[in-house]
Image (cartoon, helix red, strand yellow):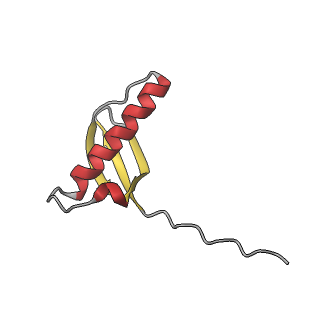
Amino acid sequence: MARKRPKGKIAAFMLFDVTYEDGMVTSNRRVSNDLLDQSFGDSIQDLARTAIEGQDNEIAMRSGQRRAKIKSIAVA
């Protein structure tokens, strides 16, 4: 008898388009909805900026190359 596969938890996230000061644009950057909790009054863009900067810092540590600072963030 075949077993039914358990349904996995659906990942909840938002997508953002990020523009950097050097002109580079990255589209569809994912940020978990858990990190976008507005209960302390922060805007979604501020929370997303913090999360994406954290992602960029982690990538920079692994690759050894820093990205430019974030110029703007928009919901994709």
Task: Pick out the residue farthest to the front.
Answer: 1
Residue at 14% across, 59% down: 41
The answer to which image quadrant residue 76 occupies is bottom left
User: Which residue occupies the foreground of this view, 54 or 73?
Assistant: 54
Question: Is the residue 12 above or below the residue 17 in the image?
Answer: below
User: Which residue occupies the foreground of this view, 7 or 63?
Assistant: 7
x then y, percent, for residue 28:
44, 53
Residue 76 visible, this angle: no
Residue at 35% across, 58% down: 34
Task: Pick out the residue farthest to the top.
Answer: 64
Locate the N terminus by quadrant. bottom right
x then y, percent, for residue 40:
16, 58
x then y, percent, for residue 8:
58, 67
Residue at 32% across, 54% down: 35
Q: How many marks?
A: 0
Residue at 19% across, 62% down: 39
Left or right position of 76 against 62: left
x then y, percent, for residue 20:
31, 38
Residue 66 visible, this angle: yes
Task: Pick out the residue farthest to the bottom.
Answer: 1
Task: Pick out the residue farthest to the right.
Answer: 1
